[in-house]
Amino acid sequence: MRLLLAEDERSLSRAIVAILEKNHYSVDAVYDGAEALAWLENGDYDGVVLDLMMPKMDGITVLRRVREAGNQVPVLILTAKSEIDDKVLGLDSGANDYLTKPFNSRELLARIRAMTRSQTAQPDSRLQVGNVTLDRATFELSSPTGSFRLANREFQMLEMLMSNPRRLIPTERFLEKIWGYDSEAEINVVWCVYFLPAEKARRPPRQHSDQGHPKRRILPGGAAMIRRLRVKFIAMSMVSLLVVLLAIMGSVNLVNYREIVEDADQVLTILADNNGAFPRQENQKEGDGTAPPSDSGQGKLREMSPELPYESRYFSVLLNNEGEVETVDTGKIAAVDTSAAIEYAQEAVSRGAERGFISNYRYAVTSDESGTRVTFLDCGRNLTTFTTFLKASCGISAVGLAAVLLLMILFSGRIIRPVAESYDKQRQFITNAGHELKTPLTIIDADAEVLEMDIGENEWLQDIRRQTDRLAKLTNALIALSRMEEGESQFQMIDFPISDVVGEAAQSFQALAKTQNKQFESRIQPMLTLHGDENAIRQLTVILLDNALKYSPEESEISLTLEQSGRNLRLLVRNTAEGVTQESLEHIFDRFYRGDPSRSSNQVEGHGIGLSIAQMIVNAHKGKNAASLQNGDTLLMTVTLPL
């Protein structure tokens, strides 16, 4: 069988050629995209192994031109680009399969065999019964009322039902076929999963795109994150400006109001000290509404404007010790008559305060041997001026805020532009760094495979492959973590049975715990559902259990609990952890944090970023993650997820 290998890294190309030739393939190797296209146009190949990032012409362009020319040769993309968008682009462009670097040679050979195998007629990917359609490619259930993406076991159950219409299928058959013969699940779990699609169908349908996922605007080049950053920048700027304006307006208006009150109280003090009238000045005569100056009012009198008695409108009421009205003086105000003055005085006395406001009148209550005098001063003009100024300042501030908001919208793009450029460079750096790291790892691993074929297995080759595998996992984890931090992880949020997902993940650790002489117990509340990403929650469970298993001593106990608490779900993992301190718990979710200061990998294999990825998954589901110590040596990891 003749294959064409298009790989620009010559060292890796030589290793792959050696692997393929040792497995009885005839291989032609080329090192750039233009050369690959020319060989495909002139040669007859049974299959193509195609890299994407090549000089002269990238792999996607080569693939598209080959398909446009009508050449249906099977193509396997072999690349370091491992993002979902890259895989979708490659497969949609016409590739038959997609394999990321670093790879295992056995997987590469198996994929080539599957790709080049004669294809029989494939059944339709859609099942239809009545007006209900199940798409086995997208896991989407469609009906006239809407379409819904199904979780794993929901899909399997409906596929069995729709593949066997008008046939009775015992619940035991579902249990054996979907959950497995050795499963501890009960019959009622089958009915729970059976009714989940019906529950979804009763909900208001969501708008879906052609791919079966809820429509959302996907902005290229991280524009969605930049847009969110721009909105946050504008919002924070406007809030800051609003706080400053409120502080300025509040201070100015408060000072203005205090001056009005202090001036009024000063006048009321003069009036109260002079029996409800202004003291007579030297140029005033008797009978003009003034009183002889009292000794207590002389200080105020020297500060008083000569025009003040003529500008002020005031009245007073004298009450005896029994509360009866003795005298009423309304000669200096026209808006208040005797009866109104008495009502104001009685209300002021009933309040129990020496000073205050009644309507637009500031009052002062003074008592002596003759009784209680209540003196009122009309502050209506000053209060009206104050109110007008307050409204004007609020209006001007609102107009200013609107103007600044408009300017921020117009110019925030220029302010954020350096951040956007830096973000795009960072994205490109992550892509290039991932490629540059994965390619030499792939070459080392492939060379080790070739050596193993020549000289057989030995401990040195096994150690090389083990360390390259470890470094490859670290590289993939770092890239995945960077994508999560940038908000680019495309979580598929659906309703799924979290009890089953957590149970499946926990079950895979039972045998591993026994081999390490550790007791593992799981308590999972059945029939719990969550709106989230099924694969991410499975990864979260695996990370927590793997961490508990790695760092617990022999003959210790590990427990996992999943329960509903109010409107939240709680996932708890307990394990004995020697040497864990309260100080270390503060850094347990930090990237590359290891409890062992020596960072030795002899005892425990790990990179220190698993819990960082777990934290990102929890944040993406708007949950909370916490670590605590119980009884001094028991580590409790608590994940709280909202329903």
Image (cartoon, helix red, strand yellow):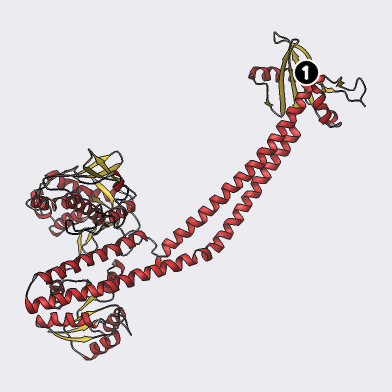
Residue 240 seen in render = yes
Which percent across, then down, holds residue 432? Answer: 33, 73
Query: Which of the 4 quarters of the picture holds residue 6?
Result: bottom left
The residue shown at (60%, 45%) is: 246
Vertical comparison of 429 with 519: above or below = below
Residue to which mark 1 is pinned? 338
Label 1 CA crowd tier, 10 Å (few <14, some 14–19, many 20+)? some
Total numbered labels placed on residues in the image:
1
The residue shown at (32%, 54%) is: 590
Query: Which of the 4 quarters of the picture holds residue 50?
Result: bottom left
Query: Which of the 4 quarters of the picture holds residue 426?
Result: bottom left
Relative horizontal placement of residue 283, taking residue 181 as reference (left or right): right
Which percent across, then down, holds residue 176? Answer: 8, 52
Vertical comparison of 499 with 447: above or below = above
Q: Quadrant of the N terminus?
A: bottom left
**In terms of secondary structure, where does tag 1 sit?**
helix
Camera-side residue: 179 or 141?
179
Which percent across, then down, holds residue 227? Answer: 45, 61
Residue 489 seen in render = no
Relative horizontal placement of residue 481, taking residue 268 as reference (left or right): left
Vertical comparison of 362 with 546: above or below = above
Camera-side residue: 523 or 145?
523
The residue shown at (84%, 23%) is: 279
Which percent across, then down, holds residue 43? Answer: 20, 90
Name the kind of residue labelled 1 in the image. Thr
Camera-side residue: 463 or 388?
463
Q: Seen from this angle, which residue lies furthest front? A: 598
Q: Seen from this angle, which residue lies furthest top? A: 322
